[in-house]
Image (cartoon, grey):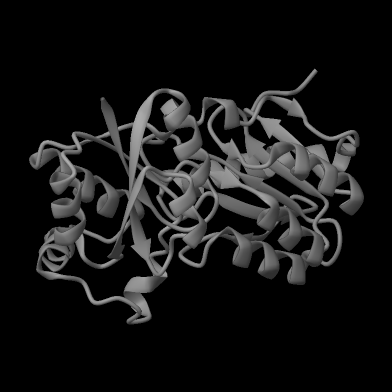
Amino acid sequence: MKKLGLIAGMGDLPMAIANEAKAQGYTVIAIALEPLADDLLSSYVDEIKWVNVGKLGKLIDSLKDYGIKQAVMAGKVSKTLLYKSKITPDLRAMKLLFSLKDRKDDSILLAITKELEDEGISLLDVTLFSSNLLTSEGVLTKDRPTDDEWKDIEFGWKIAKEVGRLDIGQTVVVKDQAVMAVEAIEGTDEAIKRGGMLAGKGAVVVKVSKPNQDMRFDVPVIGLKTLRTMSKAGARVLSVEANKSIILDRDKMIEEAKKAKITIIGYSGKPLL
């Protein structure tokens, strides 16, 4: 019997991963991070254990109790929790945080990965259980970008890749080849709101993977919430990196994008024919 530990944060991705893993013959045991994971997750997995997001020791002990040797991380865990006193890290988490040279996303996630590996638990690529969710290349909606919007996509791509290289964020909002907002600790939706407020109508949202993206964690994800935030902000185009980002509820996304007059593109940095 193949067992997969699913370390689950916010959003719908953990449920999509659970479905695919079960289809591949895995028994899926979720370690659901409180207060982030969705209550609905329990109906998608074989077993579930709720662990406070700050309790790294309990998380690892729970995986070991279930005999988990392979795990996958899915769902957002916002770093803002560290700064809003919403969590109380346990001793193991505190030791990990104090051992870091900085608190960039990759630094934290790589340290957690090492803690898991030291306990005999391998962290697998998210894409092993979400290949059907990867964003395909090309214009995914009926409407194509205008010439000016293409310029913004190309401009935004270069900026977003540099921001990703610095491990600041994965999203930028641009208009008329000027940066309106850069995603940092606040997350994609808040960056879109801020960028839309500054740009007015017609902003272009560009989301990319980091240049050296580790597909075990922090893979870019877009879903209906992203689209609805864009609609409220008056943004016009969503460009996401093809083959290195995940699109949830693709059919619903395209349907809602059509109603909201938003264009969605899978882009890889090269001109689309």
Counting from the top left corner in percent of width and height, residue 232 is at 80, 66
Does residue 11 appear in the picture of this structure?
Answer: yes
Please state, as top left, top right, bottom left or bottom right, where the N terminus lies in the image.
top left
Between 72 and 260, the residue placed more toward the observer is 72
* Residue furthest to the top: 273
Please state, as top left, top right, bottom left or bottom right, where the C terminus lies in the image.
top right
> Left or right: 173 with respect to 211?
right
Does residue 152 appear in the picture of this structure?
Answer: no
- The residue at 32%/72% (across/down) is 82
> Left or right: 131 with respect to 193?
left
> Left or right: 220 with respect to 229?
left
* Residue 251 sits in quarter: top right
Counting from the top left corner in percent of width and height, residue 148 is at 86, 42
* Residue 213 sits in quarter: top left
* Residue 2 sits in quarter: top left
- The residue at 11%/63% (across/down) is 92
Between 175 and 143, the residue placed more toward the observer is 143
Counting from the top left corner in percent of width and height, residue 224 is at 70, 52
The correct choice, above or below, for 145 with respect to 167 in the image is above
The correct choice, above or below, for 9 with respect to 138 in the image is below
- The residue at 80%/57% (across/down) is 235
> Left or right: 29 with respect to 165?
left
Counting from the top left corner in percent of width and height, residue 62 is at 18, 53
